[in-house]
Amino acid sequence: MSTGKLIIFSAPSGSGKTTIVKSLLSKDFKMQFSISATTRSPRGTEKDGVDYYFLSPDEFRTKIDADELLEWEEVYTDKYYGTLKSEVERITSKGNNIVFDVDVVGGLNIKKMYGEKAIAIFVKPPSIDELRNRLNGRGTDSAEVIEQRINKAEEELNYAPEFDHIIVNTDLNTAIVETEQLLNDFLND
């Protein structure tokens, strides 16, 4: 039985990672997005098992204790987010590849666990100034939030050399083509 591989993406906010991942999901890479688990309540039309696996804080802690999570974080008291090991099995056992959009520490931990079965890709902005321009251009965040994201980005960039590949997103189309080539090489290996 063929099993799928793991494709891990990490990047600072505003690097273009989500746009790149969405483009890849529309291509023929047999990829499915990893559904995260969370203890927050569903928003709007979000559905359990589609948008997130919604768990109570006690259920989440039970899964942590039972070693059922690949990675997890308690963002605020009783507000957990994480990736269930069963999610990897659910997708890869069908021969599909699983895509992760996770923070740098979570991404490196997943890579460490799965080794050669995983590829870890860091999407990097061309510069901090360009990242600031992109975040300002979105028009969705206050100046204070943008500065927080810039500070976090500077911290996250320190982890980039630990990833298998770094894609510098100077031009979105070029970054997508480079990422597609990486995936072709990795998935056909």
Image (cartoon, rainbow, N blue to C red):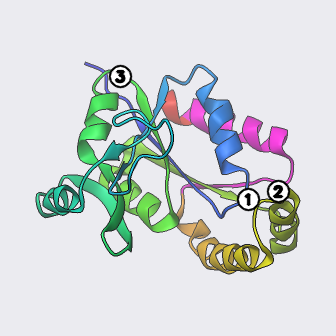
Provide the secondary structure element on which disc 3 rests. Answer: loop
Q: Residues within 10 Å of mark 3 (few under 14, many from 20)?
A: some
Look at 49% across and 56% down and name the residue there: 102
Q: Earlier in the sequence, mark 2 or mark 3?
A: 3
Look at label 1 and name its amino acid.
Gly
Question: Can residue 1 be found in the magenta stretch?
Answer: no
Residue under pointer 3: 95
Q: Which residues are magenta?
A: 164-185
Look at label 3 and name its amino acid.
Gly
Query: CB of mark 1 within 8 Å of CB of mark 3?
Result: no
State how far apart marks 2 and 3 are (Cα): 37 Å
Provide the secondary structure element on which disc 1 rests. Answer: loop
Q: Position of residue 121 (x, y in %)?
A: 58, 52
Q: Residues within 10 Å of mark 2 (few under 14, many from 20)?
A: few
Query: CB of mark 2 within 8 Å of CB of mark 1?
Result: yes
Look at label 2 and name its amino acid.
Arg
Single out the mark in the foreground, 1 or 3.
Answer: 1
Q: Is residue 126 above or below residue 143?
A: above
